[in-house]
Image: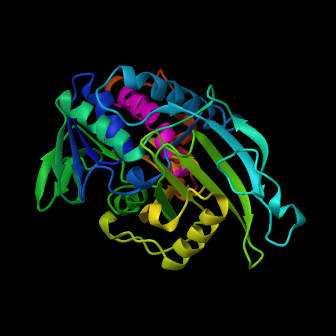
Amino acid sequence: MRVVICGGGVIGACTAYFLSRRGIDVIVVERTEVAAAASGKAGGFLALDWCAGSPLDALARRSFALHAALPGEIAGNWGYRRMTAYSGYVVAERDARRHVRADLDWLCDGVIIASRLGTTATTAIVHPRAFTTAMMNAAQGHGTELRLGRITGIVRRADGSSVGGVEVDGGVIEADAVVVAMGPWSLVAAGWMVLPAVFGRRSPSLVYDTGKDVPADALFLEYQEDSGAVVTVEVFPRADGSTHITAFSDEAPLPLDPAAVTPDSGAIDRLQAISERLSPMFRADRIIARQACFRPVTQDGLPLIGKVPRSEGAYVASGHNVWGILNAPATGEALAELIVDGVTRSTDLAPFDPIRLRSLDPSLLRSG
């Protein structure tokens, strides 16, 4: 059995790993490079139970457990470590509490910690690019082939209802199954098969070289800008000595090439000003990356994971939004089960079936 995976991000890499571990012939086709988009520029934050009460809960819990187990199973160091997570707010400049000492000594005065959101038992972090690369390397160790190229369509068999491969740079790669795992670029695949739309929301971020000066404390802080707008700032210190800070998101045209994604300069300037208000560790001379990525988002906020309607042998795994790094291992594991065995055992994928969204052809909804 040969499976072609379209996309070399974290979802594609994890799917390739779990498929190849079962002896499946896997080819990953990636246009730019492994972890070129959000998989290389996300925060890498992991949470066990933050999806409780939602359809994502079981997927997140299974994936959190896999993240804990994978460092003992495959080679590489992607900075997996447990951490504590806090919520709070930043006191406005004119507020009398502006000079109140922060509860965490690495923060500036006036940064108030209101509650603890997670402990080392429930929250953790990885370096997303290093994790994605390690998973792809592990898949290649099991025989997966990584090819650079641009996918321009799928190839259908004579019956027209099943896929037989993909078109890549004018050629054809034959396959028994095709997985679309291209993040927001999965929207392109909607022209090849019946797929609900996957949209991209752009998120800017700054990465600081903080060394050992910042402990394993993830922060989710409310910050009021001079304009009166209140934004949530997320701070993720990582084991490699870098700290990822992000806030805001906006809608912007999605470039055809992930390498062409750039941040809005105004958003980066705002984020830098906020960061400097949080801690003396976030000085301008410590910035090592000013960047942005497009998060894949669906109509109802849930990922698309499962069989593609009207295209036997076609599968999709996209639209994971802010939980792509967290949920990638369980997504890859369950999708490998679905492709090879026809059923999933590790995680129920029914809530993520693409047919659930009404943007599909109504006849598909009637036929189930």
Q: Position of residue 191 (x, y in %)?
A: 35, 63
Which residue is at 86% across, 68% downward? 95
Q: Is residue 208 left or right of residue 179?
A: right
Q: Nearer the viewer, residue 368 or 354?
A: 354
Extent of the magenta region: 321-339
Q: Position of residue 165 (x, y in %)?
A: 20, 47
Which residue is at 56% across, 45% downward? 214
Q: Is residue 274 left or right of residue 244?
A: right
**Displayed quadrant of residue 84:** top right
Q: Nearer the viewer, residue 10 or 43?
A: 43
Q: Nearer the viewer, residue 67 or 282?
A: 282
Q: Position of residue 134 (x, y in %)?
A: 30, 36
On the rendered image, what quadrant is the N terminus found in?
top left
Q: Position of residue 362 (x, y in %)?
A: 54, 56
Is residue 314 visible in the rendered structure shown here?
Answer: no
Count of numbered labels shown in the rendering: 0
Residue that sits furthest to the right in the current view: 96
Which residue is at 14% across, 61% downward? 169
Q: Nearer the viewer, residue 214 or 263?
A: 214
Q: Main secondary structure of the magenta part?
A: helix
Question: Is-magenta flag for residue 130?
Answer: no
Up/down of 152 relative to 117, above or below: below
**Displayed quadrant of residue 14:** top left
Q: Is residue 218 left or right of residue 262?
A: right
